[in-house]
Image (cartoon, grey):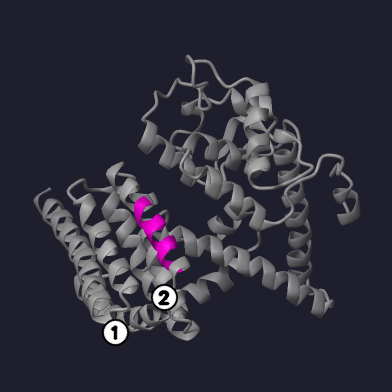
Amino acid sequence: MSISSHSKKIDFKVKPIDNSEDLDRIRELVRSKTRDLLLFDLAVETGAPAKQLLRLKVGDLYKLKVGDRISSLLNKEGKEKPATLGLKSHETFDKFMAQKKPQLGAFLFKSRKGNNPLSLSSASRLVAGWFKQTGLDGMNGLLSLRKTWELNQDQAYQKQQVIMAEENGASSYTANSIQTKTAQELVYKELEQAIVKGRLRPGEKLVTEKLARQMGTSRIPVREAIGRLEARNFVKVQPKKGVTVSELSEKNLKEILQIRLLLELEAAVKATLRSNEDTLQRLRKINSQYADAQAKNDADEALRINEEFHFTIYRQAQMPILFSMIQNLWNQVSPYYHIMFRQTLFHDPKTGSISHKKIIEGMAEKNPLKVSKWLKKDLVDSTNFVIGVMRSIQTKEGKS
């Protein structure tokens, strides 16, 4: 099949969502409603008909891994092409299970009244509401989500053709290098986020062939991504062990903390001197969301909002090189925060939000000393918490 004939499958009478920024805006809109977010992710990542999606039961996805077939779903390719579970759908389903704790026999998209699944008309109105709230005109409910999957498939198909041409020694150097670079970047970002968010756990082995198969690409962009991840200390490549996700020791966590204090306190001081009312209002809103997420024991959401709070401050310093260094250190420790917070309930949900409140007060007063004091407490307390959980887990493993 040629690229042009493949593209003809897309019917542009129903508009797809054709850029990642709009997709992110919808995901952000429904992030707190895991049922709705899961409907969105599955529709965009599987291309399954709406009627099939709405008849899904919890057990249909239970224990599936990324890339596994969802036996009850077929995408538009027909019976020969069962839909597979994507990275975002897998992540959202895990969050949905943790929050809702549903029965395996229950409908995944259950109506808010009774135990029946959402009707097609109700689901269409729900999706149409997302489009309206995000200012996306000309969309057609669930059909637009399915068309979004088709568009993504078409783009992935074209990238795959470029990769295959590269592997076969094609001579179109300029076009191949640009599009292959795009594929490598997509693979890199997916793997980086899987590590940062704890979906790929410290010590877990990465197999190039398996990853390439799951992500629908060749081994070339996966190998390139692993090389970049190794350079940033996300993975280790060893002759006999292969590729594994990097693990941090207590010693390493303490060393990273010392470096973070040097960098982040400097950024916070500069941000305090540049602070304005718009930034302060944004920080107050974020901290309120953070306190709500911790009160609900929603670890992943609390950690996401916590990062947003800190990075809002560090961006205000207007020092891009310093900000990039801070981001790199956060990414190295982030998997541990995600994993540890999921495994424990003994974290005091008030601690972080109190430190944040004091930081905001210090910025409003243009008081760098106050900001530094409470930021240091926040960073030290969170690191000590993670170390405490690590020790607790090691003690339990030693007794077992």
Element under disc 2: loop
Q: Does the magenta segment cover residue 236?
A: no
The reply to whether residue 241 is in sight is no
Q: Residue drawn at (43%, 84%), measured in percent from left and top?
A: 322
Residue type marked 2: Ser
Main SS of the magenta part reads helix
Q: Residue drawn at (46%, 75%), measured in percent from left and top?
A: 315
Q: Residue drawn at (48%, 73%), measured in percent from left and top?
A: 229
Say above or below: 356 vs 339.
below
**Which stretch did the figure color magenta?**
279-288
User: Residue 327 in the image: x percent, y percent?
Assistant: 43, 74
Q: Is residue 117 left or right of residue 138?
A: left
Depth check, front residue: 190 or 381 = 381
- Residue 188 placement: quadrant: bottom right
Say above or below: 112 vs 92.
above
Judging by the rendered image, the residue that carries numbered circle 1 is 262
The crowding category of the residue bearing disc 1, from other C-alpha atoms within 10 Å (few below 14, some 14 to 19, many at least 20), is few
Q: Does the magenta segment cover residue 285?
A: yes
Q: Is residue 232 left or right of residue 376?
A: right
Mark 1 or 2, closer to the camera? 2
User: Residue 219 in the image: x percent, y percent?
Assistant: 61, 65
Say above or below: 124 vs 139.
above
